[in-house]
Amino acid sequence: MTYSMKPILPLCQSFGILNNNKLFTFGLMFEIFDKYLLELANINEEELAAIHASAKIKHFRKWQSLLHDGEILRSMCFISSGCFRLFRYDQHGNDHTVRFGVENWWMNEPESFNNGMPSRYNIEALATSTLIIWNKADLLELQASIPSFKHFFNCLNSRALEAAHDRIFNLISASAEERYVQFQKTYPKVFNSVPLHMVASYLGISRETLSRIRRDYSHR
């Protein structure tokens, strides 16, 4: 399916989303999202225009927070550029990284978003980043009016659940070395871009163990 920005831009301007100075930037921000969505869902140009019109663009500085524990996450976020992590503090004040989010991925805390509950988790940017954001009410309205978009999110939720199960199984069954190799495959752009203690936390190993594994693999 081919897609042109031509029918989208006038509509976005009519909604007051853009001015002429920001028109080109807006198109670039959505380019990655459009390619991703149209490869996975049967969305026509009119529907895509509605999806665009309901979205907001937000830029984040490195270390800027998207969500603090105790807050309610009211938006679904697509990472147009950059990197984020979802993490939680234990009773001793140590933070544990649960997942990373990179370009072309969604960033969410489903318990808070779906149930309207204060989050037990935090989300922060690990690099200068850009998100495309839909608030919950607009997202539900889009899903109600665009069946293929609702089906897309149903599939997305199923895949997220499968990934969570795989991660749990990997943590309890795989060796530290196997988890390290899998991490490199899953997050090839992350490993050399974030502090090692975050990677070690995600893998469920100490920073010293991670450093040893890295040394061993560098000599192979």
Image (cartoon, grey):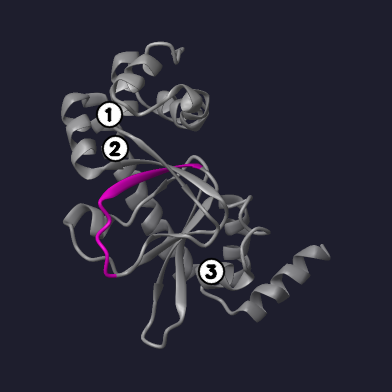
* Label 2 Cα crowd, 10 Å radius (few <14 / some 14-19 / many 20+): few
Mark number displayed over residue 192 = none
Determine whether 24 is above or below 62 in the image: above
Mark number displayed over residue 149 = 1
Left or right: residue 219 versus residue 100 is right
Foreground residue, 11 or 156?
11
| Mark whose residue sits in front, 3 or 2 | 2
Q: Secondary structure at mark 3?
A: helix
Rendering coords of residue 137 (x, y %): 18, 41
| Mark whose residue sits in front, 1 or 3 | 1
Would you say residue 114 sits in the magenta stretch? no
* Label 1 Cα crowd, 10 Å radius (few <14 / some 14-19 / many 20+): many
Q: Mark 1 to mark 2: distance in Å? A: 6 Å
Q: Secondary structure at mark 2?
A: helix
* Magenta stretch in the rendered image: 70-80
- The residue wearing badge 2 is 153
